[in-house]
Image (tube, helix red, strand yellow):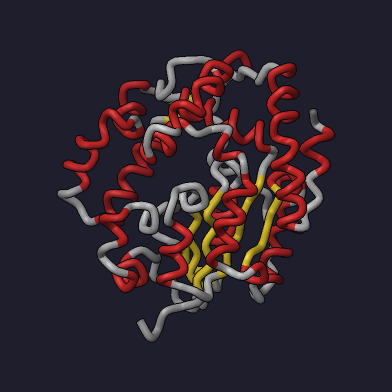
């Protein structure tokens, strides 16, 4: 499309602040975000086959005065083939990557999925079964990878295989949460967008389902066919808005006794296992990630 706007995409990592970044970007007068935070366009082959023009034409909000399009979908960094598809549609795209302490990120993903009974084992049990499970198929890799999703170095190398380093920007979750205004405006400066006043916000924080049955229907892979049949009756953007509204209604903040921290000894063990990857990520990104290892 000749009138396509410059494209900025945040491909992950999952549970590293991508929803908060999406919320902040949606407030910027020069940025039109996707109608739902995650369009799945580059991770769902059936959607991608509709063509890039379909994506530009239907997936973004109509925002007068906007000069940039933005999407945040944390599956794009981990799911195979996504970065290549993004390059096919927008070789000049700017890529914004959010990185979080790898063990904290993995445990946050586990807790989120446990909130609707997606897993039936402890975090430690799931970690010990993970390598065997994710080797079975791409679908199992997508479903069961928690620790593997936190091995950022291979994912960053995949990004660099399709986009030059100067088109990639890194945000470290812990610094982003500590000073959203400074980190977000640092990103805006890199994008050549006007600075913006930022009221600190936190989107997609830990939550508990009011109805576990409804949560399973919304998210669990067992019900994918039912969701697909329902979705086939509605335009994609409308389906996404309904899904988001129902999901929001069905969640509440956890009470203090419902928050179960990760066992400290297991956390140290996993961080020790992740040290080689963390050091490689420092070399690939130029980011100082010593704060992750100090927290061990």
Q: How many marks on residues?
A: 0
Q: Is residue 98 above or below residue 269?
A: below
Percent x, y for residue 112? Answer: 50, 30
In front of the other: 40 or 258: 40
**Quadrant position of the C terminus in the picture:** top right
Name the outermost residue toward the bottom: 2
Q: Residue at x 58, y 33 (%)?
A: 147
Q: Is residue 207 left or right of residue 214?
A: right
Percent x, y for residue 171? Answer: 69, 54
Q: Is residue 233 above or below residue 102?
A: below
Q: Is residue 230 above or below residue 89?
A: above
Percent x, y for residue 76? Answer: 47, 53
> Which of the 4 image quarters holds residue 139?
top left
**Quadrant position of the N terminus in the picture:** bottom left
Percent x, y for residue 65? Answer: 49, 78
In front of the other: 263 or 157: 157
Q: Residue at x 83, y 42 (%)?
A: 290
Q: Residue at x 45, y 63 (%)?
A: 84
Q: Residue at x 34, y 70 (%)?
A: 52
């Amino acid at each position: 499309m000749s009138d396509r706007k410059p494209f900025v995409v945040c491909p992950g990592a999952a549970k590293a602040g991508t929803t908060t970044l999406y919320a902040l970007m949606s407030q910027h007068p020069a940025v039109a975000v996707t109608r739902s935070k995650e369009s799945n366009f580059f991770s769902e082959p059936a959607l991608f086959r509709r063509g890039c023009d379909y994506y530009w034409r239907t997936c973004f909000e109509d925002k007068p005065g906007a000069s940039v399009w933005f999407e945040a979908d944390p599956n794009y960094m981990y799911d195979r083939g996504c970065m290549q598809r993004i390059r096919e549609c927008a070789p000049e795209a700017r890529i914004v990557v959010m990185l979080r302490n790898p063990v904290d990120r993995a445990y946050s993903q586990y807790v989120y999925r446990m909130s609707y009974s997606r897993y039936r084992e402890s975090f430690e049990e799931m970690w010990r079964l993970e390598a065997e499970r994710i080797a079975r198929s791409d679908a199992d890799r997508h479903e069961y990878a928690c620790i593997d999703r936190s091995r950022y170095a291979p994912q960053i190398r995949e990004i660099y295989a399709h986009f030059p380093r100067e088109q990639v920007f890194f945000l470290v979750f812990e610094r982003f949460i500590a000073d959203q205004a400074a980190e977000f405006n640092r990103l805006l400066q890199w994008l050549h967008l006007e600075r913006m006043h930022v009221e600190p916000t936190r989107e997609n924080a830990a939550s508990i389902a009011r109805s576990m049955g409804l949560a399973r229907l919304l998210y669990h892979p067992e019900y994918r066919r039912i969701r697909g049949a329902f979705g086939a009756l509605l335009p994609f953007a409308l389906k996404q808005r309904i899904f988001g509204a129902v999901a929001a209604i069905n969640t509440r903040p956890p009470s203090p006794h419902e928050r179960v921290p990760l066992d400290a000894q297991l956390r140290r063990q996993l961080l020790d296992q992740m040290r080689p990857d963390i050091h490689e990520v420092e070399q690939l990104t130029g980011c100082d990630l010593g704060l992750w290892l100090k927290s061990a």
